[in-house]
Amino acid sequence: MSESSSNPPNRARWCELINQHLLGTISKDDAIELEAALKASREAREDYRQRCNVDAALRQEAAGQPMPTRVTAPKPARWLTWRPLTAAAAGIVFGMFCTSVVFGFVVQHGFEKKTPLAVFQPSFEDAQMSLAKGFPDASARWGGDEARVVMAENGIQAKEGKFMLRLEASPKGSPRIVYQVLDLTSLPSSRSNEMREIEISTSFAAADASASVRYMLRAFAVSEPRENLDAAWFEHRDEAIASAMRGLDVLPGNHGWQTMGLKIQVPRAARSLVLFFGARTPNKTLPQAAHYLDDVQVSLIEPQPIP
């Protein structure tokens, strides 16, 4: 049976969908789109098999088991949409570089030096802080969907300080997202002069803990300077020179703050780092509630030799 030649799927798009699937953040509609791409393209199926091989191998390595020489990926149609075991559950983060994908799993020996990077209002202690609508331009430090700075409410106290960012409930159940763009041009060169490792962490909480929720954290290393990035850039985010993502699923009944983080290998050519924070309730039939974001931390990780 020959491959379909009409309306061929876009490779950058199916790569993104495969990443979302492996991290457990893919929606039902996107899973259907990925199924269609796998049926239509032999190249997509090969990408899928390779990613599953790497995913399974990294999970075994994280569990202290030997790395297999090859892992055969199951047929995706049987379990693609609701895959229960994800890379996010194993605490593994993937880096994607350019159009050819390279996965990194680095175990550093010795000591690490963490240098905090400047984040605008990391704990939202400015009660009058305004949020730019949509992707932030060069003058707006935080941007995104409807959100505002609040004090303690709905039984949630700020994780740090007195204030936190409230992501307003979405009437349609779509994700609520906020962004910040960091300037990397002042960072020192890494020892290898090729890559820098940056760690991002944050905490989320739900106003209503009666429903399951999915929190998302993504980072994009970009070669353009911060002042050249605008809302149009996000439509071309797959052109980032490196990216990493993490999803966290929280079951009903889990009250309080949920902390998550990731690390990204950033090429020295990167001049900006786009940070993406999102929250959504997967079950759109349930009443939608607000979510809170606080304590955003970004650090440069520098391995130090053992004395």
Image (spheres, grey):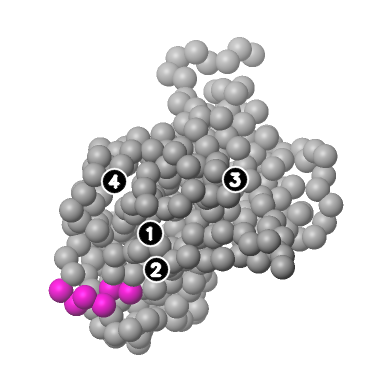
Q: Earlier in the sequence, mark 3 or mark 4?
A: 3
Q: Secondary structure at mark 1?
A: strand
Cβ atoms under marks 2 and 1 closer than 8 Å: yes
* In front of the other: 282 or 70: 70
Q: Which residues are magenta?
A: 123-128
- Mark closer to the observer (3, 4): 3
- x and y percentages locating residue 134 in the rendered image: 23, 51
Residue 127 is a magenta residue: yes
The residue depicted at 78 percent of the width and 40 percent of the height is: 71
Q: Which residue is mark 1?
A: 277
Cβ atoms under marks 4 and 2 closer than 8 Å: no
Label drawn at residue 226: 4
Q: Which residue is mark 2?
A: 296
* In front of the other: 96 or 284: 96
Question: Which quadrant is the C terminus positioned in?
Answer: bottom right
Residue 200 is a magenta residue: no
Identified by mark 3, the residue type is Ser
- Mark closer to the observer (3, 1): 3
Q: Which residue is mark 3?
A: 192
